[in-house]
Image (cartoon, rainbow, N blue to C red):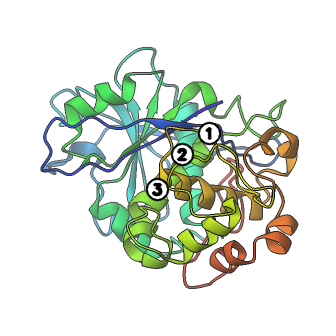
Amino acid sequence: MRRWRFSVLSLNILGALLAISCGGGGGGGSSSPTAPTATATTTTTTSSLGVCAISTAQASVTPTFDIITIPAGDPFASAATKCIRVFGVMVMAVNTGAAITDAKLTHAATITAEWLDNNEDGLVDDPPVNNSMLERTTTVVLINGDGDLDFFMQRVGELVQHNAQEVGVFETAPDRCKGCGGPEYDAAAEEILHLIQNNGWNFVYSDIDDRGVTTNKLTTAMDVARGGNFQSIPASYPASAWYTYDDANCDYACQLTEYLFWLVTSAADGNSHRCSIIEHEWDLCTRALVESSDSLGWAIITDPTYNIPTVHPNGSYR
Protein backbone atom coordinates (compact mmCIF):
# COMPACT_ATOMS: atom_id res chain seq x y z
CA MET A 1 0.00 0.00 0.00
CA ARG A 2 1.25 3.46 -0.81
CA ARG A 3 1.56 6.12 1.79
CA TRP A 4 2.47 9.77 1.42
CA ARG A 5 4.17 12.09 3.84
CA PHE A 6 3.52 15.79 3.57
CA SER A 7 6.11 18.55 4.03
CA VAL A 8 5.41 21.85 5.76
CA LEU A 9 6.64 24.58 3.44
CA SER A 10 7.34 28.17 4.35
CA LEU A 11 4.99 30.86 3.14
CA ASN A 12 8.09 32.75 2.09
CA ILE A 13 8.92 30.12 -0.50
CA LEU A 14 6.45 30.88 -3.24
CA GLY A 15 5.65 28.15 -5.67
CA ALA A 16 7.39 25.48 -3.62
CA LEU A 17 6.32 21.94 -4.32
CA LEU A 18 5.00 19.64 -1.67
CA ALA A 19 7.35 16.74 -1.04
CA ILE A 20 5.78 13.31 -1.30
CA SER A 21 7.51 10.23 0.07
CA CYS A 22 7.25 7.20 2.30
CA GLY A 23 5.59 3.93 1.42
CA GLY A 24 4.09 1.14 3.47
CA GLY A 25 2.22 1.65 6.68
CA GLY A 26 -1.34 0.88 7.37
CA GLY A 27 -4.00 1.24 9.98
CA GLY A 28 -7.13 -0.25 11.20
CA GLY A 29 -10.34 0.11 12.97
CA SER A 30 -13.03 -2.07 14.37
CA SER A 31 -15.37 -4.28 12.41
CA SER A 32 -18.20 -2.71 10.44
CA PRO A 33 -17.42 0.93 11.27
CA THR A 34 -20.31 3.36 11.01
CA ALA A 35 -19.60 7.01 10.27
CA PRO A 36 -21.79 9.81 11.56
CA THR A 37 -24.63 10.88 9.30
CA ALA A 38 -23.55 13.88 7.25
CA THR A 39 -25.84 16.68 6.15
CA ALA A 40 -25.08 18.72 3.05
CA THR A 41 -25.28 22.48 3.47
CA THR A 42 -24.13 25.66 1.80
CA THR A 43 -23.07 28.62 3.91
CA THR A 44 -21.54 32.03 3.30
CA THR A 45 -18.81 33.90 5.11
CA THR A 46 -16.62 36.93 4.62
CA SER A 47 -13.55 35.07 5.87
CA SER A 48 -10.50 34.95 3.61
CA LEU A 49 -10.86 31.17 3.79
CA GLY A 50 -14.41 31.22 2.53
CA VAL A 51 -17.18 28.89 3.65
CA CYS A 52 -14.78 26.31 5.09
CA ALA A 53 -13.14 28.75 7.49
CA ILE A 54 -12.98 27.72 11.15
CA SER A 55 -13.16 30.37 13.85
CA THR A 56 -11.52 29.97 17.23
CA ALA A 57 -14.94 29.36 18.77
CA GLN A 58 -15.91 26.78 16.14
CA ALA A 59 -12.65 24.88 16.69
CA SER A 60 -13.78 23.91 20.18
CA VAL A 61 -17.26 22.75 19.19
CA THR A 62 -18.22 19.09 18.79
CA PRO A 63 -18.14 18.29 15.04
CA THR A 64 -21.51 17.96 13.31
CA PHE A 65 -20.02 16.52 10.09
CA ASP A 66 -22.14 18.80 7.93
CA ILE A 67 -20.84 18.73 4.36
CA ILE A 68 -20.36 22.28 3.12
CA THR A 69 -20.58 22.88 -0.62
CA ILE A 70 -17.90 25.28 -1.83
CA PRO A 71 -19.62 27.82 -4.12
CA ALA A 72 -18.25 29.54 -7.18
CA GLY A 73 -16.14 32.53 -6.21
CA ASP A 74 -15.02 30.99 -2.92
CA PRO A 75 -11.24 31.15 -2.29
CA PHE A 76 -11.10 27.34 -2.51
CA ALA A 77 -13.47 26.90 -5.47
CA SER A 78 -10.68 26.25 -7.97
CA ALA A 79 -9.19 23.48 -5.85
CA ALA A 80 -11.95 21.81 -3.82
CA THR A 81 -15.65 21.02 -4.12
CA LYS A 82 -16.77 20.55 -0.51
CA CYS A 83 -15.49 20.41 3.04
CA ILE A 84 -16.21 19.40 6.62
CA ARG A 85 -14.97 21.28 9.68
CA VAL A 86 -13.52 19.07 12.43
CA PHE A 87 -12.30 20.99 15.46
CA GLY A 88 -9.30 22.98 14.10
CA VAL A 89 -8.95 21.01 10.86
CA MET A 90 -10.55 21.47 7.45
CA VAL A 91 -11.28 18.25 5.54
CA MET A 92 -11.69 18.89 1.79
CA ALA A 93 -12.46 17.02 -1.43
CA VAL A 94 -10.17 17.89 -4.34
CA ASN A 95 -11.74 19.51 -7.40
CA THR A 96 -10.19 17.33 -10.10
CA GLY A 97 -10.87 13.87 -11.48
CA ALA A 98 -13.81 11.77 -10.30
CA ALA A 99 -16.09 13.37 -7.74
CA ILE A 100 -15.14 12.45 -4.16
CA THR A 101 -18.10 10.76 -2.49
CA ASP A 102 -19.70 12.15 0.63
CA ALA A 103 -18.99 8.82 2.33
CA LYS A 104 -15.24 9.12 1.78
CA LEU A 105 -15.16 12.74 2.92
CA THR A 106 -17.21 11.97 6.02
CA HIS A 107 -15.02 9.01 6.86
CA ALA A 108 -11.85 11.12 6.76
CA ALA A 109 -13.55 13.72 8.95
CA THR A 110 -14.62 11.00 11.37
CA ILE A 111 -11.08 9.65 11.68
CA THR A 112 -9.84 13.19 12.33
CA ALA A 113 -12.40 13.60 15.13
CA GLU A 114 -11.48 10.23 16.66
CA TRP A 115 -7.78 11.09 16.83
CA LEU A 116 -8.37 14.57 18.26
CA ASP A 117 -11.16 13.56 20.66
CA ASN A 118 -9.98 10.07 21.49
CA ASN A 119 -12.34 9.58 24.44
CA GLU A 120 -15.20 10.86 22.27
CA ASP A 121 -16.72 13.14 24.88
CA GLY A 122 -17.29 15.86 22.29
CA LEU A 123 -14.32 17.94 23.43
CA VAL A 124 -10.89 18.01 21.85
CA ASP A 125 -8.44 16.18 24.14
CA ASP A 126 -5.50 18.56 23.74
CA PRO A 127 -6.54 22.20 23.17
CA PRO A 128 -2.98 23.50 22.61
CA VAL A 129 -2.44 20.93 19.84
CA ASN A 130 -5.81 21.77 18.30
CA ASN A 131 -4.99 25.48 18.46
CA SER A 132 -1.65 24.86 16.78
CA MET A 133 -3.40 23.07 13.94
CA LEU A 134 -5.98 25.83 13.62
CA GLU A 135 -3.27 28.50 13.48
CA ARG A 136 -1.55 26.59 10.68
CA THR A 137 -4.74 26.17 8.64
CA THR A 138 -4.22 22.41 8.80
CA THR A 139 -6.09 20.64 6.01
CA VAL A 140 -6.87 17.07 5.00
CA VAL A 141 -7.35 16.71 1.23
CA LEU A 142 -9.19 13.73 -0.26
CA ILE A 143 -7.59 12.92 -3.63
CA ASN A 144 -8.18 10.51 -6.50
CA GLY A 145 -4.55 9.87 -7.45
CA ASP A 146 -1.02 11.10 -8.05
CA GLY A 147 -0.79 14.77 -8.91
CA ASP A 148 -4.02 15.77 -7.19
CA LEU A 149 -2.31 17.27 -4.17
CA ASP A 150 -0.02 19.30 -6.44
CA PHE A 151 -3.17 20.48 -8.23
CA PHE A 152 -4.62 21.58 -4.89
CA MET A 153 -1.45 23.23 -3.59
CA GLN A 154 -0.69 25.11 -6.79
CA ARG A 155 -4.07 26.81 -6.49
CA VAL A 156 -4.55 27.33 -2.76
CA GLY A 157 -1.27 26.33 -1.11
CA GLU A 158 -0.76 29.75 0.43
CA LEU A 159 -4.28 29.77 1.84
CA VAL A 160 -3.53 26.63 3.86
CA GLN A 161 0.02 27.76 4.64
CA HIS A 162 1.15 24.66 2.70
CA ASN A 163 -0.01 22.51 5.63
CA ALA A 164 -2.07 19.92 3.80
CA GLN A 165 -2.07 16.13 3.93
CA GLU A 166 -3.50 13.97 1.17
CA VAL A 167 -5.63 10.89 1.73
CA GLY A 168 -6.25 8.73 -1.33
CA VAL A 169 -9.84 7.55 -1.80
CA PHE A 170 -8.46 4.26 -3.12
CA GLU A 171 -6.70 3.40 0.15
CA THR A 172 -9.24 4.33 2.77
CA ALA A 173 -12.63 3.25 4.11
CA PRO A 174 -15.55 2.76 3.68
CA ASP A 175 -14.15 -0.08 1.54
CA ARG A 176 -10.56 -0.42 2.82
CA CYS A 177 -9.99 -0.87 6.53
CA LYS A 178 -9.45 -3.40 9.31
CA GLY A 179 -12.58 -5.49 9.47
CA CYS A 180 -13.59 -4.61 5.89
CA GLY A 181 -12.62 -7.94 4.33
CA GLY A 182 -8.85 -8.05 4.46
CA PRO A 183 -5.62 -7.03 6.18
CA GLU A 184 -5.52 -3.60 4.57
CA TYR A 185 -4.88 -0.66 6.82
CA ASP A 186 -7.12 2.37 6.51
CA ALA A 187 -4.68 4.97 5.23
CA ALA A 188 -6.81 7.82 6.55
CA ALA A 189 -5.86 6.80 10.09
CA GLU A 190 -2.18 7.00 9.27
CA GLU A 191 -2.10 10.14 7.18
CA ILE A 192 -4.23 12.13 9.60
CA LEU A 193 -2.08 11.02 12.54
CA HIS A 194 0.94 12.29 10.59
CA LEU A 195 -0.90 15.58 10.10
CA ILE A 196 -1.49 15.93 13.83
CA GLN A 197 2.16 15.18 14.54
CA ASN A 198 3.48 17.64 11.97
CA ASN A 199 1.16 20.54 12.76
CA GLY A 200 0.34 19.90 16.40
CA TRP A 201 2.69 17.84 18.54
CA ASN A 202 5.80 19.20 16.83
CA PHE A 203 4.97 22.75 17.86
CA VAL A 204 3.61 22.05 21.32
CA TYR A 205 5.92 19.34 22.66
CA SER A 206 9.61 19.75 21.87
CA ASP A 207 10.40 16.38 23.47
CA ILE A 208 8.55 14.56 20.68
CA ASP A 209 9.21 16.98 17.81
CA ASP A 210 9.87 14.72 14.82
CA ARG A 211 11.64 17.25 12.63
CA GLY A 212 14.98 15.85 13.79
CA VAL A 213 16.40 19.28 14.48
CA THR A 214 17.65 18.36 17.94
CA THR A 215 18.11 15.36 20.20
CA ASN A 216 15.02 14.71 22.28
CA LYS A 217 13.08 11.83 23.83
CA LEU A 218 11.72 10.74 20.47
CA THR A 219 15.09 10.65 18.69
CA THR A 220 16.67 8.78 21.60
CA ALA A 221 13.89 6.18 21.64
CA MET A 222 14.01 5.69 17.89
CA ASP A 223 17.78 5.27 17.82
CA VAL A 224 17.41 2.43 20.31
CA ALA A 225 14.58 0.89 18.27
CA ARG A 226 16.72 1.00 15.12
CA GLY A 227 19.83 -0.29 16.88
CA GLY A 228 21.82 2.91 16.37
CA ASN A 229 21.78 6.50 15.16
CA PHE A 230 21.41 6.20 11.39
CA GLN A 231 20.96 9.49 9.57
CA SER A 232 20.30 7.50 6.41
CA ILE A 233 19.09 3.97 5.79
CA PRO A 234 21.86 1.49 6.72
CA ALA A 235 22.87 -1.37 4.44
CA SER A 236 21.41 -3.64 7.10
CA TYR A 237 19.95 -3.08 10.55
CA PRO A 238 21.43 -4.71 13.67
CA ALA A 239 19.76 -7.94 14.70
CA SER A 240 18.60 -6.22 17.90
CA ALA A 241 16.52 -3.61 15.99
CA TRP A 242 12.72 -3.84 15.97
CA TYR A 243 12.15 -0.80 13.75
CA THR A 244 13.74 -1.42 10.36
CA TYR A 245 12.11 0.91 7.86
CA ASP A 246 14.15 0.76 4.66
CA ASP A 247 12.67 3.35 2.29
CA ALA A 248 15.71 5.23 0.96
CA ASN A 249 13.52 8.32 0.35
CA CYS A 250 12.69 8.56 4.05
CA ASP A 251 15.27 10.74 5.82
CA TYR A 252 15.88 10.85 9.57
CA ALA A 253 12.97 13.21 10.25
CA CYS A 254 10.66 11.02 8.15
CA GLN A 255 11.88 7.98 10.09
CA LEU A 256 10.85 9.73 13.31
CA THR A 257 7.35 10.36 11.98
CA GLU A 258 6.95 6.74 10.98
CA TYR A 259 8.34 5.51 14.29
CA LEU A 260 5.82 7.51 16.29
CA PHE A 261 3.06 6.26 14.00
CA TRP A 262 4.02 2.64 14.72
CA LEU A 263 4.24 3.29 18.45
CA VAL A 264 0.87 5.00 18.73
CA THR A 265 -1.09 2.70 16.43
CA SER A 266 0.38 -0.54 17.80
CA ALA A 267 -0.22 0.49 21.41
CA ALA A 268 -3.78 1.38 20.35
CA ASP A 269 -4.25 -2.10 18.83
CA GLY A 270 -4.41 -0.90 15.25
CA ASN A 271 -1.90 -3.40 13.87
CA SER A 272 -2.52 -6.71 15.63
CA HIS A 273 -4.40 -8.04 12.60
CA ARG A 274 -1.38 -7.70 10.31
CA CYS A 275 1.73 -8.62 12.26
CA SER A 276 3.21 -10.78 9.50
CA ILE A 277 2.59 -8.08 6.90
CA ILE A 278 4.49 -5.33 8.73
CA GLU A 279 7.27 -7.36 10.36
CA HIS A 280 9.77 -6.33 7.66
CA GLU A 281 9.43 -2.81 9.06
CA TRP A 282 8.06 -3.08 12.58
CA ASP A 283 8.14 -6.04 14.99
CA LEU A 284 5.99 -4.73 17.84
CA CYS A 285 2.51 -5.11 16.38
CA THR A 286 0.58 -5.25 19.68
CA ARG A 287 0.26 -3.13 22.79
CA ALA A 288 1.84 -5.87 24.90
CA LEU A 289 4.89 -6.05 22.64
CA VAL A 290 5.37 -2.28 22.68
CA GLU A 291 5.15 -2.22 26.47
CA SER A 292 7.54 -5.14 26.97
CA SER A 293 10.09 -4.35 24.25
CA ASP A 294 10.29 -0.58 23.75
CA SER A 295 10.57 0.99 27.19
CA LEU A 296 11.56 4.43 25.92
CA GLY A 297 8.82 4.54 23.32
CA TRP A 298 6.28 3.24 25.81
CA ALA A 299 7.29 5.98 28.27
CA ILE A 300 6.56 8.60 25.61
CA ILE A 301 3.14 7.42 24.53
CA THR A 302 1.93 6.79 28.09
CA ASP A 303 3.19 10.11 29.48
CA PRO A 304 0.03 12.12 30.27
CA THR A 305 1.91 15.29 29.34
CA TYR A 306 1.44 14.55 25.65
CA ASN A 307 -2.18 13.34 25.59
CA ILE A 308 -1.28 10.64 23.06
CA PRO A 309 -4.40 8.78 21.80
CA THR A 310 -4.83 5.29 23.23
CA VAL A 311 -7.76 4.04 21.14
CA HIS A 312 -7.38 3.43 17.42
CA PRO A 313 -10.05 5.05 15.21
CA ASN A 314 -12.68 2.69 13.83
CA GLY A 315 -14.70 5.03 11.64
CA SER A 316 -17.44 5.61 14.22
CA TYR A 317 -17.46 8.77 16.33
CA ARG A 318 -19.81 9.21 19.31
Q: Which residue is situated farthest in the front direction here?
A: 235
Label 1 element class: helix
Q: Residue at horizontal 58%, vertical 73%?
A: 220
On residue 187, which mark appears? 1
Point out the frontmost of discs 2 and 3: 3
Q: Residue at horizontal 50%, vertical 72%?
A: 208
- Residue 35, image x, y percentages: 65, 44
In the image, 58 versus 200, the foreground residue is: 200
- Residue 253, image x, y percentages: 46, 56
Whether residue 205 is visible to the viewer of this picture, yes or no, is: no
> Image quadrant for the C terminus?
bottom right
| Mark 3 residue crowding within 10 angstroms, few (<14) / some (14–19) / many (20+) | some
Point out the frontmost of discs 3 and 1: 3
- Residue 197, image x, y percentages: 48, 61
Say if mark 2 contacts mark 1, CB within 8 Å: yes
On residue 253, which mark appears? 3
How far apart marks 3 and 1 lie (CA) works out to 20 Å
Mark before the other along the chain sequence, 3 or 1: 1
Label 2 element class: helix
Kind of residue at badge 1: Ala
| Mark 1 residue crowding within 10 angstroms, few (<14) / some (14–19) / many (20+) | many
Q: Which residue is mark 2?
A: 191
Corner quadrant of residue 70: top left
Kind of residue at badge 3: Ala
| Mark 2 residue crowding within 10 angstroms, few (<14) / some (14–19) / many (20+) | many
Kind of residue at badge 2: Glu
User: Position of 178 compared to 75: left or right?
Assistant: right
